[in-house]
Image (tube, rainbow, N blue to C red):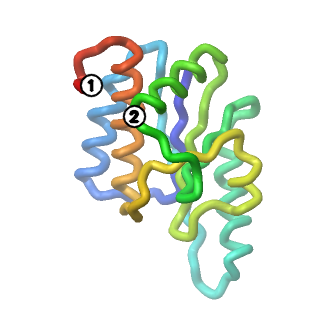
């Protein structure tokens, strides 16, 4: 199974890339984690609908057909780490690849968000974009560690 993190925005600080790389390499071969960064649409004088449409096109192009889509959304379902571990286990049993999608500065296109198979939120706080990537990959690794009885997660 593959976990594909699709994130709008191509540049992140070095600390975020280092943290991402550290967690991503920890996953076992049967659970690959991959990051696909897609270009943020230049803001300029475009309407919000134009921005959403351009970024949605890029996001959809980055996601292979048949992939389960999970939108990260501030209005999504709040999960505990243990609940995320249960979700991860269910996704693995289903066998489909999963794309977790992080929107750009204005979030995700409402229609894309609504069409996603699931919507989850990482926090009630507004987080810097780079931190969302790191928090997400760390929590996915922690969820895997719970399911694998790995000592990373301690209660």
The secondary element bearing badge 1 is classed as loop
Q: As displayed, is residue 70 above or below residue 89?
A: below
The secondary element bearing badge 2 is classed as helix
State which quarter of the image contains the C terminus.
Answer: top left
Residue 62 is situated, as x and y percent measured from the top left of the image, at 64, 44
Q: Is residue 136 visible?
A: yes
Q: Residue at x 57, y 64 (%)?
A: 107
Q: Is residue 38 visible?
A: no
Residue 63 is situated, as x and y percent measured from the top left of the image, at 66, 40
The residues bearing labels 2 and 1 have C-alpha atoms spaced at a distance of 10 Å
Rendered image quadrant of residue 113: bottom right
Indicate which disc residue 153 carries.
1
Residue 21 is situated, as x and y percent measured from the top left of the image, at 31, 37
**Is residue 75 shown left or right of residue 154?**
right
Residue 56 is situated, as x and y percent measured from the top left of the image, at 69, 57
Q: Can you name the residue that lies furthest to the bottom here?
A: 45
**Is residue 24 shown left or right of residue 64?**
left
Q: Residue at x 39, y 38 (%)?
A: 137
State which quarter of the image contains the N terminus.
Answer: top right
Rendered image quadrant of residue 87: top right
- Whether residues under marks 2 and 1 lie with C-beta atoms below 8 angstroms apart, the answer is yes
Q: As displayed, is residue 47 above or below residue 51?
A: below
Indicate which disc residue 81 carries.
2
Q: Residue at x 73, y 74 (%)?
A: 49
- Density class for disc 1 (Cα within 10 Å; few <14, some 14-19, many ≥20) is some
Viewer-closest of 119 and 78: 78
Q: As displayed, is residue 92 above or below residue 84?
A: above
């Amino acid at each position: 199974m593959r976990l594909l993190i699709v994130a709008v925005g191509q540049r992140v600080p070095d600390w975020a890339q280092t943290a991402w790389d550290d967690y991503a390499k920890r996953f076992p071969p049967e659970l690959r984690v991959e990051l696909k960064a897609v270009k943020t649409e230049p803001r300029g004088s475009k309407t919000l609908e134009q921005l959403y449409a351009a970024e949605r096109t890029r996001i959809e192009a980055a996601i292979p057909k048949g992939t389960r889509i999970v939108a990260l959304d501030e209005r999504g379902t709040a999960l505990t780490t243990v609940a995320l571990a249960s979700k991860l286990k269910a996704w693995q049993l289903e066998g489909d690849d999963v794309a977790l999608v992080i929107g750009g500065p204005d979030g995700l296109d409402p229609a894309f968000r609504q069409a996603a198979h699931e919507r989850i939120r990482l926090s009630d706080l507004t987080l810097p974009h780079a931190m969302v990537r790191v928090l997400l990959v760390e929590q996915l690794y922690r969820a895997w560690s719970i399911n694998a009885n790995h000592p990373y997660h301690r209660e």
